[in-house]
Image (cartoon, rainbow, N blue to C red):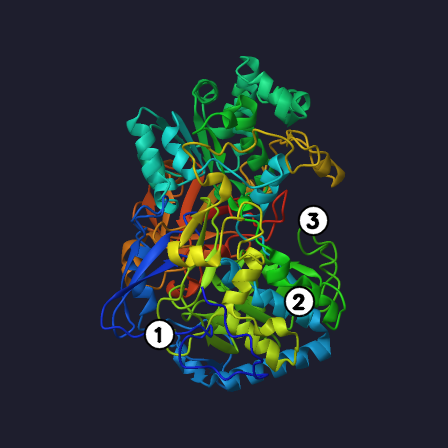
């Protein structure tokens, strides 16, 4: 790979009409060419994608790379139709500015252009820089809040030049908790690093336990390995309150009540220990705090757990025995489990099961939540937190929890009476100014943030300056002062790891950016220069940042752990390279957590956590009913537990606006699934229009009766608010209450009631 010319560059570079990353365009050719890219959407599969480009520079085909051992030549239904997204007729292709006098409010689909006018990039960047300077000078730099998540998970697109920019600016930092932080922190408290069973090794399992994991719906490249294991005699057990695609084809679907996962895991431990099915040798060598865990597990008898979960005591016993006595046993745990108030404890308890049985010792056994801990990028070089020392603050800024955006936009700096605004990792979030500028990229908080009505009230503020970098008119762009056109992963270069496999991958730019769309790297580099930031890092090219992420040494090789064999040239030619420990799995299989020391305080797997105890948290997992659950006082007014589900053909809110995807899911998005007994007691029938409500908000949906849900549980799906007739989505019902560990959102601890509309 060529490193860009390092000659001095002008202080401000005018946007070029193509190749926004400053990379040389591929030579014109009358023949089709194939370019290796990587899907950067928020999915564990991180697929290697081959893009066919014609002589005119138009992408005409996308397909999975058959040489990538996890992608294996096929794509999910979302990305297989990716060119519909790239060439969508309603894509935002030019910078837009809100017209003078037009209020910030929800806009009906198709009418957004009436509120905005096209401007040049120079006009937009100059105006944005001037306004950010003004806000920083008037209110303090911490009054500026970036808001982003995993709209792209590439190293550069997710967090590189943007982090440099906001560090140097002195803007508030964002605690990015919206998806996985509770579960991630919980896993780390047990194992110290996020590693897991290699995806390819699931084919060797004899039992696969999918716990809150809809593999067939949103982890589709694990599915062929599951199917191979089943052909060889493995059983698939799914634990999920909802009958997902995966649950529908499982050998046994266990529909527990929402939020009772901790109790079930501890109940399994009770049976395992009571029947001496644990691996005492592994426990003695590899774990810390076993006796204390055993004492806690004694409280969770099968009868007690059955009362909580809705299972029978015999089913609790059967599950525990089958799991503990089948070898190899692989557990696929996903992040839905941790989106309840007791979510951190739930992940901790489930994560301990393979340590209790010694399942990590067997190839094809163990567990997988995330493999992301294996990719040790040089984040300090990429994100440059040291730039905060040159900011007006002279230090790192305060941190605001993204899961409390509604409160941040309506209470921060205004009302100090409601306690700290954020997770246990950020203790000074209420200190400092109100938020006066919001810069949104890689996310759509107008749809995905909890407590939608509070978020909307904040976004409607006349004194809030809002910039949104996106591809489409979304629920968030309706409130923007400026909308900036973003690129797809076909239109910029990036490097990427994964949280579902162990391959470093290079995503090459396949086509020129459409219209005047620009990448995150280009955008924040340009803004930095217009803000007068003179540090040379703001002129780094994508290739230079990739070299920094890989810590390329003098010999051209990465110096990062497990990447020492990786060079840019090899990535350029091969597209994907396994991490060192995964280079030859047949001769040297990777068995995580089978040797010491681990990256925990004790150096061992921690059943008992002194670190959690020191933080004032329970050092052992325990079931604690949520403030919004069937056991709470709130249930007297709102007796139904709401499962806010995601659509199999969307990626959170991404793809929801595309006709092909929407055709498959649109009816599901306006549907409330109810158990027949709950519907009957409310005089509700199939097809009735109903109002689903609680103290925070309401939404009207159409009833679909389903015995696949436990009684007392209703389910509805996330959608764009602007695509609903009333301009709301199910997050009008969710709260900003946080999880027990990690400060994550509690999307699945929600109580509602239902009445005829």
Location of residue 142 by image quarter: bottom right
Viewer-closest of 481 and 101: 481
Viewer-closest of 356 and 292: 356
Spot occupied by residue 268 in the image (x, y as percentages of width and height)? 52, 23
Say if mark 3 contacts mark 2, CB within 8 Å.
no
Q: CA distance from mark 1 to mark 2?
A: 37 Å
Closer to the observer: label 3 or label 1? 3
Closer to the observer: label 1 or label 2? 2
- Furthest residue in direction left, as rendered: 30
Q: Which residue is mark 3?
A: 424
Q: Identify the residue at image location x=65%, y=60%.
A: 400
**Going from the N terminus, do you reach mark 3 or mark 1 first?**
1
Q: Which residue is mark 1?
A: 110
Q: CA distance from mark 3 to mark 1?
A: 42 Å
- Furthest residue in direction front, as rendered: 555
Q: Is residue 168 above or below residue 282?
A: below
Q: CA distance from mark 3 to mark 2?
A: 22 Å
Per the image, label 1 sits on a secondary structure element best described as: loop
Left or right: 674 as drawn, with respect to 534 = left
Q: Which residue is mark 2?
A: 167
């Amino acid at each position: 790979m060529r490193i860009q010319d390092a000659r001095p560059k002008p202080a401000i570079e005018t946007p070029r009409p193509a190749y926004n990353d400053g990379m040389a365009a591929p030579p014109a050719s009358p023949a089709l060419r194939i370019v290796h890219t990587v899907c950067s959407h928020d999915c564990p599969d991180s697929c290697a994608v081959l893009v066919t480009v014609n002589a005119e520079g138009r992408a005409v085909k996308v397909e999975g790379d058959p040489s990538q051992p996890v992608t294996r030549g096929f794509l999910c239904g979302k990305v297989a139709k990716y060119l519909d997204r790239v060439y969508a007729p309603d894509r935002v292709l030019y910078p837009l500015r809100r017209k003078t006098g037009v209020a910030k409010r929800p806009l009906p689909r198709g009418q957004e252009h009436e509120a905005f006018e096209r401007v040049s990039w120079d006009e937009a960047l100059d105006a944005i820089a001037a306004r950010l300077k003004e806000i920083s000078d008037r209110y303090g730099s911490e009054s500026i809040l970036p808001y982003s998540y995993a709209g792209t998970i590439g190293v550069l697109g997710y967090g590189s030049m943007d982090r440099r920019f906001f560090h140097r600016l002195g803007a508030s930092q964002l605690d990015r908790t919206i998806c996985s932080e509770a579960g991630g922190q919980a896993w780390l408290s047990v194992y110290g690093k996020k590693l897991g069973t290699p995806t390819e090794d699931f084919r060797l399992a004899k039992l696969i336990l999918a716990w809150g994991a809809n593999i067939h719906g949103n982890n589709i490249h694990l599915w062929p390995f599951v199917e191979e294991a089943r052909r060889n005699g493995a059983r698939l057990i799914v634990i999920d309150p909802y009958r997902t695609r995966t649950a529908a084809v499982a050998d046994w679907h266990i529909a527990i009540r929402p939020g009772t996962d901790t109790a079930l895991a501890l109940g399994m431990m009770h049976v395992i220990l009571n029947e001496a099915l644990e691996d005492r040798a592994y426990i003695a060598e590899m774990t810390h705090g076993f006796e204390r865990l055993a004492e806690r597990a004694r409280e969770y008898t099968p009868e007690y757990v059955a009362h909580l979960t809705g299972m029978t005591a015999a089913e609790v016993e059967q599950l525990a025995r089958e799991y503990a006595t089948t070898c190899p046993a692989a557990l696929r745990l996903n992040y839905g489990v941790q989106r309840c108030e007791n979510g951190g404890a739930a992940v901790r308890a489930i994560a301990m099961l393979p340590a209790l049985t010694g399942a990590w010792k067997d190839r094809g056994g163990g567990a997988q939540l995330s493999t992301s801990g294996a990719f040790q990028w040089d984040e300090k070089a990429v994100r440059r937190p040291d730039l905060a020392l040159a900011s007006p603050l002279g230090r790192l800024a305060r941190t605001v929890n993204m899961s409390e955006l509604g409160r941040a936009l309506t209470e921060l700096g205004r009302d100090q009476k409601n306690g700290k605004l954020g997770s246990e990792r950020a203790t000074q979030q209420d200190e400092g100014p109100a938020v006066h500028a919001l810069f949104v990229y890689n996310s759509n908080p107008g749809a995905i943030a909890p407590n939608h009505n509070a978020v909307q009230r904040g976004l409607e503020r006349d004194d809030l300056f809002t910039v949104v970098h996106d591809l489409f008119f979304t629920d968030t762009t309706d409130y923007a002062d400026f909308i900036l056109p973003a690129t797809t992963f076909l239109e910029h270069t990036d490097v990427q790891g994964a949280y579902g496999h162990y391959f470093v991958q290079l995503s090459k730019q396949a086509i020129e950016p459409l219209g005047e769309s620009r990448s995150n790297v280009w955008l924040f580099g340009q803004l930095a220069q217009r803000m007068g930031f003179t540090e040379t890092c703001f002129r780094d090219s994508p290739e230079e940042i990739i070299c920094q992420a890989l810590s390329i040494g003098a010999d051209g090789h990465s110096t990062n752990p497990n990447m020492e064999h990786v060079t840019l040239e090899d990535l350029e030619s091969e597209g994907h390279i396994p991490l060192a420990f995964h280079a030859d799995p047949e001769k040297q299989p990777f068995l995580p957590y089978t040797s010491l020391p681990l990256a925990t305080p004790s150096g061992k797997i921690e059943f008992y956590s002194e670190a959690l105890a020191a933080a004032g948290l329970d050092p052992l997992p325990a079931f604690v009913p949520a403030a919004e659950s069937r056991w709470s006082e709130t249930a007297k007014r709102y007796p139904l537990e709401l499962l806010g589900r995601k659509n199999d053909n969307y990626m959170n809110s991404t793809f929801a606006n595309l006709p092909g995807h929407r055709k498959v899911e649109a009816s599901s998005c306006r549907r409330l699934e109810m158990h027949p007994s709950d519907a009957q007691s409310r005089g509700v029938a199939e097809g009735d229009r109903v109002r689903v409500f609680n103290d925070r908000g309401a939404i009207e949906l159409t009833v679909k009766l389903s015995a696949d849900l436990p009684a007392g549980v209703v389910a509805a799906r996330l959608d764009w608010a602007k695509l609903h007739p009333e301009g709301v989505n199910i997050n009008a019902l969710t709260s900003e209450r946080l999880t027990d560990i990690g400060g994550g959102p509690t999307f699945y601890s929600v109580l509602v009631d239902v009445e005829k509309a």
